[in-house]
Image (cartoon, rainbow, N blue to C red):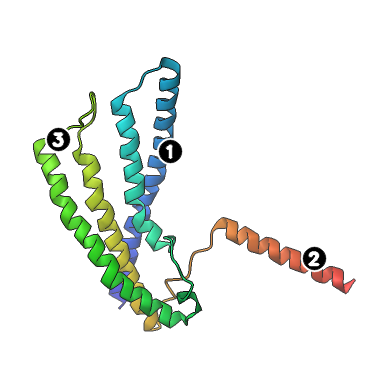
Amino acid sequence: MRSLLAISRFFDFVNVKVTQLVIWLTLLMAIVSAINATYRKVFNDSSNAWLEIQWYLFGAVFLLAGGYTFLKNAHVRVDVINSRLKERTQVIIDLICVLFFLFPACGLIVYLSWPFFMKAYVTGEMSNNTGGLIRWPVKLLIPIGFSLMITAGLSHVIKCVAFLKGMAPNPLRKDKSSDEELLEELKEESGGNNNNNNEK
């Protein structure tokens, strides 16, 4: 199990590093978007290449960060029923969902998108827009993005099994954001002040 947990940590490391790149891509996307908007307003003109760079970057941000989002349990969930169950039951349900829904869906998308990318790469497919870009880099993002989701899913499965064996913490517990930590600190301070006032 320890070797599997090491693999899990490696998958997490990969997704974290990719997401650190995505952070910079997000900044670059914002800059390109601002340049496009300014150029269009000031010169009443636009560049298809720059517009396509903008949505290429958006595609990269959207697809490459999926694994990290899963890693942090930040995907949208409807836990009306599941949240009322015991932790162990929640983990078992999550494990089943990953094995029978996430893996097949992501695997199918990778399987179908790889020929989609290869055709664009081999033929040197270009944008239909004048001055547009080559298409294969953005199409390559699809299998890469969903492969990262698969690695995040594998990491999650390992953590779930380790938790069920009593060898790891509950992987479904969300990491607290800085805002959440600050809110808790403020609540504690407020509670402490109220107690002091009551004592007086």
Find the distance from the CA under tag 2 to the CA under tag 1.
42 Å
Say what amino acid the circle numbered 2 marks: Asn
Q: Which residue is mark 2?
A: 193
Q: In the image, what residue occupies the spot 86% across and 68% down?
A: 197
Q: Which residue is mark 1?
A: 27
| Residue 103 placement (x, y as % from top left) | 25, 66
Q: Is residue 178 left or right of residue 44?
A: right
Q: In the image, what residue occupies the spot 45% across and 23% down?
A: 38
Q: Are marks 2 and 1 in contact (CB under 8 Å)?
A: no
Vertical comparison of 35 with 80: above or below: above
Classify residue 15 by image quadrant.
bottom left
Q: Quadrant of the N terminus?
A: bottom left
Q: Secondary structure at mark 2?
A: helix
Q: In the image, what residue occupies the spot 9% across and 37% down?
A: 123
Q: Earlier in the sequence, mark 3 or mark 1?
A: 1
Q: Residues within 10 Å of mark 2 (few under 14, many from 20)?
A: few
Say what amino acid the circle numbered 3 marks: Glu
Given residues 178 and 54, the one toward you in this image is 54
Q: Quadrant of the C terminus?
A: bottom right
